[in-house]
Amino acid sequence: MNYELLATCMLVLMAVALLGALVAVVWATTTALRKRSGGVPRQENHVPLRRIVAGVAAGTLLIGVLSFLLGSSETIVVNGRTYDDGLWLRAADMFIVTAGVLLVVGAVAYAYSELRGGASGRRSVKINKSKREGA
């Protein structure tokens, strides 16, 4: 088997996937900003959107920085090859730890949301039927 050709194909596929992801992020961001035309509103339906956006961005950045600083730069051996570059070892550790932490945070947030009634509106909300029928 031609492993060099396989490795080249994998690298090209990785580069195309990365480029596609970057294009999707730029497109989604510009589309969202154009629709809002004034940035993120302060509140919508009594939900503090700016605080949520700022909190998620700050939390993700904080988790990334902490996991990089606390990451291991210990030399590893994979398939007989030694990897000893501390920067890349810490960067790899950062991505792995950050992804794991964000998955756990997402699962906890989902569980908390479901315990409170969920986003589908299953909470007990009193509706004034006389106003609804008259409208």
Image (spheres, rainbow, N blue to C red):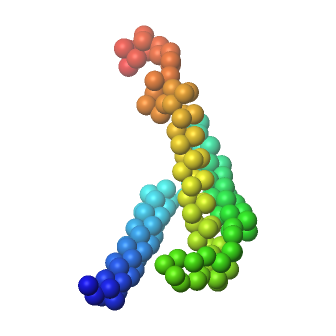
- Can residue 16 be seen by looking at this rendering? no
Q: Position of residue 41 (x, y in %)?
A: 57, 50
Q: Nearer the viewer, residue 38 or 17?
A: 17
Does 135 appear above or below 10?
above
Does 38 appear above or below 117?
below
Furthest-left residue in view? 1
* Residue 125 placement, left or right of 59: left
- Can residue 107 be seen by looking at this rendering? yes
Q: Quadrant of residue 70?
A: bottom right
* Residue 111 placement, left or right of 67: left
At a point 60% along the width and 53% down the height, the residue shown is: 101
Q: Position of residue 45 (x, y in %)?
A: 54, 37
Question: Which quadrant is the C terminus positioned in?
Answer: top left
At a point 46% along the width and 27% down the height, the residue shown is: 121
Q: Nearer the viewer, residue 29 or 90?
A: 90
Furthest-top residue in view? 130
Q: Position of residue 20 (x, y in %)?
A: 37, 73
At a point 66% along the width and 55% down the height, the residue shown is: 59
